[in-house]
Amino acid sequence: MKGIVIKSTGSWYHLLTEDGTTYQARIRGKFRIANIKHTNPIAVGDEVDFEIDKDGTAVITTIHDRKNYIIRKSVNLSKKTHIIASNIDVAFLVVTLSNPKTSFGFIDRFLITAEAYHIPVVILFNKMDSYTEEEKAELEIYKSIYNSIGYESLDISAETGLNLNLVKEQMKDKVSLVSGHSGVGKSTLLNALNPDLNLKTHEISDFNSKGQHTTTFAQMYEWPFGGFIIDTPGIKEFGLVHIDKSELQGYFPEILELKHNCKFDNCIHVNEPKCAVRDAVENGDIAISRYENYLTFLEEDIYTDK
């Protein structure tokens, strides 16, 4: 039998078959040895084959090839990675300007990882109903940076319903992933799109203005309007992994566009002469925040074999 992994709690996996039946399943030991670079051999979104064991337990026997997946550094095992989800048509990154504030660094890390694994991203600027005029002006800076390099964004409010009809259109009949910091309103957004989900939500902590984790593991839900959504745990930091130093510039669309104008073919845009990318930064054609993050990422220990 075939199924899609819709929930993973570590040792057990929930599978959904084409006829709408769900099974709780385990995996054979060999999968714990294979893919040893990852802490989880099977991820939400995986297509699998399974059989019913003699004791009536569903056992996953085969994992189908993934068309893509998105990973992060393991929280507890720094040398390993954790697959957040797989087989994604589009990812929605929920960003807020306050309570909590999403940094350019966090956004760029997510976008680079999505670029590396060929996953389109839509940026959702949430909590539009709560921003001051100063925060709205800051939002325009965010939007100008990311829209100018080809990323689509939407101003939304999960509380008031602003533009949620546009979000629904983007998600219809697709496998979507929603991610972002804890507290940016992911669960509130999903509840607004489908109240029957009734996902838990928490208020922002007054002590540190940070969100509390309400989702502890990735889980896939079916939309009544067609398609699926993968809800992911809130992420404090998004560490880059499995990206070669020479490839990093290829995941910045604005750098990739200009690299061929540099004097040297192997230019990495740090201190080489006649660098078109650094000229673009000085001229304001590439955002300083993006370039500074590029330099920061170059120095990080993210260059391990895929």
Image (cartoon, rainbow, N blue to C red):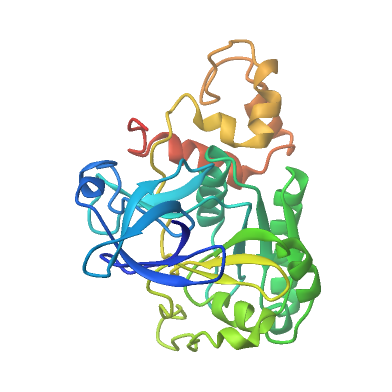
Does residue 158 appear in this view?
Answer: no
Front-lying residue, 19 or 171 = 19
In this rendering, the answer to whether 78 lies above or below 54 is above
Q: Quadrant of residue 300?
A: top left
In this rendering, the answer to whether 129 lies above or below 27 is below
Q: Is residue 16 left or right of residue 23?
A: right
Front-lying residue, 110 or 189 = 189
- The x, y position of residue 141, in whole percent, is 72, 58
- The x, y position of residue 233, in whole percent, is 43, 69
Residue lying furthest top: 264
Query: Quadrant location of the C terminus?
Result: top left
- The x, y position of residue 168, in whole percent, is 74, 70
Does residue 29 appear in this view?
Answer: yes
Front-lying residue, 64 or 274 = 64
Query: Quadrant location of the N terminus?
Result: bottom left
Front-lying residue, 208 or 174 = 174
Residue for point 54% across, 50% down: 87
